[in-house]
Amino acid sequence: MVDTVAQADASIDPIALRRAFGTFVTGVTVVTTRDEDGTPRGMTANSFASVSLDPPLLLVCVGKSASSFQAFNGADSFAVNFLHEGQIDISAIFASKSPDKFQSVSHDRIHTGAPILTDSMTWFDCSVHNRIEAGDHVILIGQVRAFGASPSAPLGFCRGRYASVNDPLPAGWLASHGIVIGYLIEAEDRLLFRADGKDGWVLPTARRRKADKRLMLDGGELSLVPEDTFLYSVFDVADSDPGYLIYRARLSDEGSAMALPADLKFFPVDDLPYDQIPTHELRSMLRRYMRERREKRFGIYMDTGDGGRVAMIEGQAQAWMQASHD
Ligand SMILES: Cc1cc2nc3c(=O)[nH]c(=O)nc-3n(C[C@H](O)[C@H](O)[C@H](O)COP(=O)(O)O)c2cc1C
């Protein structure tokens, strides 16, 4: 072992100890609560641990020197928000002593009233189950009353620095979490398909629904025109099906120049491989897309017990910032 410093109990150096603790790889959370007047309070914390499934318990350690300590120590409830890789700035805000940490961060009440950060990767809304004195921290044990998880990539932390966690999503994760997010991606009169491994072609699927320039697909990355990404269809293929949310999008010029992930292929719009598209739902959605594309007017489909409906959208998309000022 390199750099091992054996320390006897009496002479433990807190700085060396902090450094040694810091070699443990963690995620980053923002723990939140409300003080006596209902004002939201929060701090960045990586001391989270899951504790029990039955009853559902988790813990986080809150430092007694934190200015929000009194709020955490007096509250009946708190929330733990796991941050995703795009939230280093949020981690910095909540690790600071800023008096108005919540001003620029959108948050909500879900169950207990503890603030849930709207854009967090995963959240747990808890009632306080127990508090345990532990040196310069208090271990706050929460009973989970409500929670939510999303497929975004987590923000990691190790040795005092943020770390990225590559490709964290196992195959099938989205399906087992309730929804498949598919994309109809067009570029130069061609549509993008993904080989399904069974001689068929399906739509590429993604991990996040958000219209960003960079689209993380299962198996690779593409660059899109974010202003041209819209919801197109919401349907199930069978009763047991997790449900599909399909967006239409356009590859950016930069994306057209990038190498495609190996299992993706563009097909000309007038020569789509209908015979190799495995489900009737997908085939009929593609036929509608082709029709609407010719008419340059797109609808949004929502399936219902009586065969579903399409709502046609009039006019061009506008930026919300602009539309809300008209
Ligand atoms: C990645 C990271 C993890 C942290 N983990 C904890 C933690 O688990 N417990 C804690 O009390 N403070 C932790 N801190 C420090 C607090 O976020 C920091 O002391 C903050 O200023 C507390 O806010 P407050 O004083 O407004 O309550 C962490 C900071 C960072 C950057």
Image (spheres, rainbow, N blue to C red):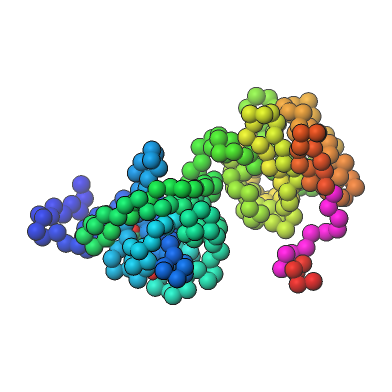
Q: Please check the rendered image and state whether residue 302 is part of the magenta-colored stretch, yes or no.
A: no
Residue 229, image x, y percentages: 72, 52
Which residue is nearer to you in this view: 113 or 176? 113
Rendering quarter of residue 227: bottom right
Q: Please check the rendered image and state whether residue 316 is part of the magenta-colored stretch, yes or no.
A: yes
Q: Is residue 15 above or below residue 58?
A: below
Task: Point out the residue furthest to the right here.
Answer: 295
- Residue 39 visible in the displayed image: yes
Residue 283, image x, y percentages: 78, 32
Kindly identify the residue that appears in the image at 65 percent across and 24 percent down: 198
Q: Which residues are magenta?
A: 312-321
On screen, residue 237 versus residue 62, left or right, reads right
- Which secondary structure class fits the magenta region best? loop
The C terminus lies in quadrant: bottom right
Kindly identify the residue that appears in the image at 73 percent across and 48 percent down: 231
Report ligand 1 position as a quadrant.
bottom left
Which residue is nearer to you in this view: 122 or 260? 122
